[in-house]
Amino acid sequence: MSSASAPLSARQIARRRRGRALRRTWAEFRRHRSGVVGLVVLTAFVLMAVFASLLVDPEGLEVTKATGGVLEGPSGQFPLGTDDNGRSVLTLLIYGARISLFVGLLATAISMVIGTLMGLMSGFFEGWPSAILFRVTEWFLVIPFLPLALVLASVLGRSLWNIALVIGVTSWPGTALLIRSQTLSIKERPYLDRARVLGAGRWHLMSRHILPNVMPMVLANTTLTVAIAILTETTLSFLGLGDPTRVSWGSMLEDAFTVGAMTTGAWWFIVPPGVCVVLVVLAFTLVGQSLEEIFNPRLRRR
Amino acid sequence: MSAREAEPTPHSTPGSSPATSPGERPQSRAFLEARGVVVEFATRSGSVARALDGVDLAVAPGEIVAVVGESGSGKTTLARTLMGLERPVAGEVSVGDRPMPRSTRAMRTFRRKVQMVLQDASGSLNPRQTVYESVAEGIRLHRLADARSGTAEADLVAKALSDAGLRPPQPLYLRYPHELSGGQRQRVLIAGALAVRPDLIIADEPVSSLDASIRGELLALLLRLRDELGLGVLVITHDLGLAWNIADRIAVMYLGRVVEQGPTEQVLEHPRHPYTQALLSVVPEIDRLEPQVLRGEIPDPTRIPPGCRFHPRCPALAEGESERAGVADACRGVPLPVLPADDRHAAACHLDAVRHAPGTPAS
Ligand SMILES: Nc1ncnc2c1ncn2[C@@H]1O[C@H](COP(=O)(O)OP(=O)(O)O)[C@@H](O)[C@H]1O
Ligand code: SF4
Ligand SMILES: [Mg+2]
């Protein structure tokens, strides 16, 4: 009876299972109104970034092809006015979304990989290897973040990749601590003993049992980290450490301040990028908090 | 071994503890064997709990051995130690005459041959794995599936599940542990262990959460696998009736020691240790014995009583039987030897030693 009625291959089964889990999470997510609002806002920004070239002409970014006057107020031709070079602020804003989101996501990816690995290993291993990893994490946690980022950014040079790298290597300790504490609690579960009895080695235990059980937490944490990374990108660009050849929301704010948009009352150059940063950060935070509530049973019980 | 040497006792066999005594069943070469195993745990208060205090136990291929005893007597710790999940501080576990492997690779080979069904059925399944994945895990770890020879993974999983009494298996494939009943979880665990096709299976209270019909079916399966494939079984249970039905040999544990052991019929029909007698007296099917409810609780393994570890609760001592036999002082002060794991019926008891002294006919 075994072979005749077993038409499902292992892969089909895995796919079905994943589909089921995903649908269940989605159903639960939809019940969190703030998370849904955040997701809608995020989707809008992502679509805007991806289809930027359909929305506005990329030539509008070039200083030499600027058509407007210096710091012109909003008009029919320039809905959000112009910058100090006569470029449309709307064009800059839309293309700036690309850079800000890209740097934020890349930095988060770097931070997540480092944080997850460090947390997993310092929680799973015992004795001095774990102690060393834990010390390193603590050390990165206590050194003041902005000065370190400033030093690294100025040493590495001003490029998009470097900015992401700097944010990534300075923002992982929080993730590492979270993953570590999760790993420590999962390590004691009886199903790890069962896997050991079945013949599993360390790698199998970590990749098949611990990681899948901490992964939801990583995911929730990721969205929160993206928010921080985008904010940091803005800060670093505002301090003049961003990529000088690209327009991001942070670099727009920096420009606005250097040309004195604040004192001349050119609010259209300051408010839009500022609002965009706040909106995106808020949206990521809302989504992250909802995910955390779904995946962290301790929060859910409340 | 040091545990045994630490206690000079009148009955100890110095130097060695042969698994088989000469002349008796020379073919019963132990497959998995514990010798003088001591396992300790540090407690929160800082004292040391001796969960196992010198245990000899052996299982031969094709043999079914039952370990019985009250909760807290160290049965689970013994099973975990035999499986290499706990490291003994003294004594050793050997696998087919070799010491328990230490390297990851050798350990994997060992676990291909010896499997265990853990006691906690609800916590032993990964909540994020489906039934299929849980059962397939061992098959994948040991690369047992081979589609060309007609043993595709799904076939092996289906077979293991239906062997464990989950028929038809397919509807369960995508279930998660929290969607199963306690009995189903227990059977998924058993299926996962069977799927590896071990030579020996250690089952810690495998049927305690199952109803009678499934229990009978599983025990029949174990007996069949033993007969067909020579599967050895070490079954831990507090159900003496179960032990009676399937075991060839029984070891009775109390507070970290085997206090009586031997062939099942001899131990259960002529129990020699007052502890075994008390356990048997409350089994409903046996009404030969006056029901005896043991006084008090099993002591804390951080403070093992001196002399015979059972003496604070021993009915024979309390009722003056030991006094009349002249061993009451020994009960309170003279430690008893570790019982060797062989086919002879033996009990670690001073009273029994006088009654079964050489010259007196055995029961
Ligand atoms: N991991 C552990 N830490 C501390 N004490 C333990 C641990 N495991 C078992 N013990 C103690 O060892 C003794 C024997 O336990 P166990 O082997 O589970 O007995 P049984 O399975 O016969 O009920 C108990 O007193 C228990 O409290
Ligand atoms: S040695 Fe004494 S106290 Fe211990 S079981 Fe035998 S009779 Fe009872
Ligand atoms: Mg137990």
Image (tube, helix red, strand yellow):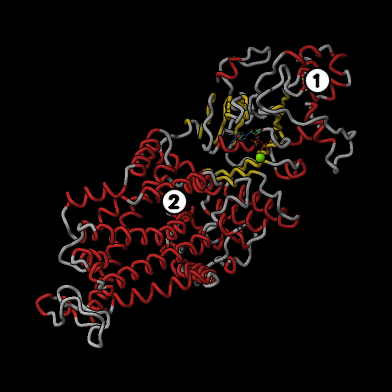
Q: Position of residue B39 (x, y in %)?
A: 58, 28
- Which subunit holds the residue at mark 1? B
Q: Within 10 Å of the Cα at label 1, are there few (<14), some (14-19), or many (20+) other Cα atoms?
A: few
User: Of A61 and B331, which appears nearest the observer?
Assistant: A61
The picture quadrant where one finds residue B246 is top right
Q: Position of residue B203 (x, y in %)?
A: 62, 45
SS class of the residue under badge 2? loop
Outermost residue on the bottom side: it is A76
The residue positioned 45% from the left and 40% from the top of the image is B107
Left or right of A7: which side holds B315? right
User: Do marks 2 and 1 share a chain?
Assistant: yes
Amino acid type for the residue under numbered disc 1: Pro
The residue positioned 77% from the left and 16% from the top of the image is B331
Which residue is tagged 2? B142
Which residue is tagged 1? B361
**Residue A151 higher or lower than A229, as above or below:** above
Amino acid type for the residue under numbered disc 2: His
